[in-house]
Amino acid sequence: MNIFKTVEEKAGMLPEKYRQMSVEELENIVRTIKNKLGSKLFLPGHHYQKDEVIQFADATGDSLKLAQLSQENKEAEYIVFCGVHFMAETADILTTDEQKVFLPDMRAGCSMADMADIDQTDRAWTKLINRFGDTILPLTYVNSTAAIKSFVGRNGGATVTSSNAEEMVRWAFEKKQRILFLPDQHLGRNTAFNLGVALDEMAVWNPIIDRLEYEGELEKVKVILWKGHCSVHENFTVENIKDIRQTKPDMKIIVHPECRREVVELSDLAGSTNYIINEINRSEPGSSWAIGTEMNLVNRIIQQHQDKEIISLNPHMCPCLTMNRIDLPHLAWSLESIDQGNAHNLIKVDKTIAADAKLALERMLGNN
């Protein structure tokens, strides 16, 4: 092997030989190693993964469900998480020291999670506590880094999912007068609004300029929203909804709560990924739907429901680019490296960070 290939592989880059393999060859590698390792291997696949990967998943679901299934699967020595980095971190936090969690491509991150780093958050917290005193409880969406989950755990807060966000915000308000909601402003805003918090009682913390964006009397603020967003869901617009209403007036519009407030307001239904899937599953044959969520999932739903008219709310929407980093070549490489004893892309969260992050997760799980 030449020096450039050695450096590439040590850096976690896919060796060229996997790029040259046919789909059949790659699928044979995955299938063979899965059969060989049996119950020692667990392969969770997030809803937004490509079909070429999801076909091999032992379980599909959202990030927290898959992390919990990893935790419950005590037989699995190797967990190859087909999702993004923060999801694999959560699986590592919840599983035992003997279990090893791998991410097939370390470039599979999450732009939303990256919008709140720990240095920004520590600075913001200091300024907010100086201004509002001990009146704030932090909550973080599970779509966040282990460091942010750890920060929340240290400060008495909890994680939330898009399914239980309302329940967790109620829990937080029972403890403190205000909440800091990280890192997705749209989920935080939509959740708080549904619970009766007025829009003029919500401020936005801008981590780029270290400043609270708010016009009005600060004492009125109940919710402080971190200025982060999902790059996929923010691309659904009011114009998309107007187009559907004009061209297909009988079509129902269902969106994820990571969409902007005005998009959720104009839609017929809004809810988590599982909520969207369940609503389509129980809808009548012949019904028609425009779905505002990630394109890989929308395409899979379309294929599963040929008896219904289903389209993406945004006809120009692309799949989540970072989710798409996990592909068949990376999956085959990951499994083959485990089988050959030279596994790469191990996800290992620092023990101190993991302990506090687990507190935040357990506070949520204890309330569900």
Image (tube, rainbow, N blue to C red):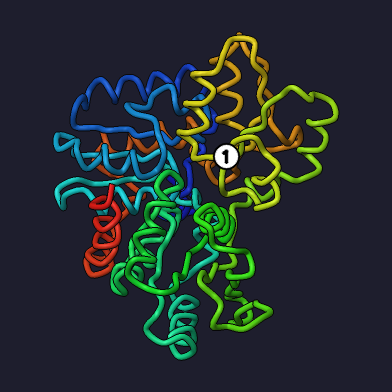
Q: Residue furthest right?
A: 246
Residue 269 seen anywhere in this rendered image of the structure? yes
Q: Secondary structure at mark 1?
A: strand
Figure quadrant of the N terminus: top left
Residue pictured at 55% horizontal, 64% vertical: 115
In the image, residue 15 sits, relative to residue 24, either above or below, namely: below
In the image, residue 233 sits, relative to residue 197, either above or below, namely: above
- Residue type indicated by callout 1: Ala
Q: Quadrant of residue 205?
A: bottom right
Disc tally is: 1
Q: Quadrant of residue 73?
A: top left
Q: Position of residue 134 (x, y in %)?
A: 37, 84
Residue pictured at 49% horizontal, 89% vertical: 131
Q: In the drawing, does residue 10 fall left or right of residue 236? A: left
Residue pictured at 73% horizontal, 36% vertical: 314
The residue that mark 1 highlights is: 270
In the image, residue 8 sits, relative to residue 24, either above or below, namely: below
Q: Position of residue 147 (x, y in %)?
A: 37, 67
Closer to the camera in the image, 276 or 64 = 276
Q: For mark 1, does the 10 Å Cα neighbourhood hold few (<14), some (14 to 19), or many (20 or more) residues?
A: many
Closer to the camera in the image, 350 or 258 = 258
Q: Residue furthest bottom?
A: 130
Q: Position of residue 81 (x, y in %)?
A: 36, 40
Q: Position of residue 242 (x, y in %)?
A: 81, 38
Q: Quadrant of residue 137?
A: bottom left
Residue 6 seen anywhere in this rendered image of the structure? no
Residue pictured at 34% horizontal, 60% vertical: 171
Closer to the camera in the image, 278 or 70 = 278
Q: In the drawing, does residue 318 fall left or right of residue 13? A: right
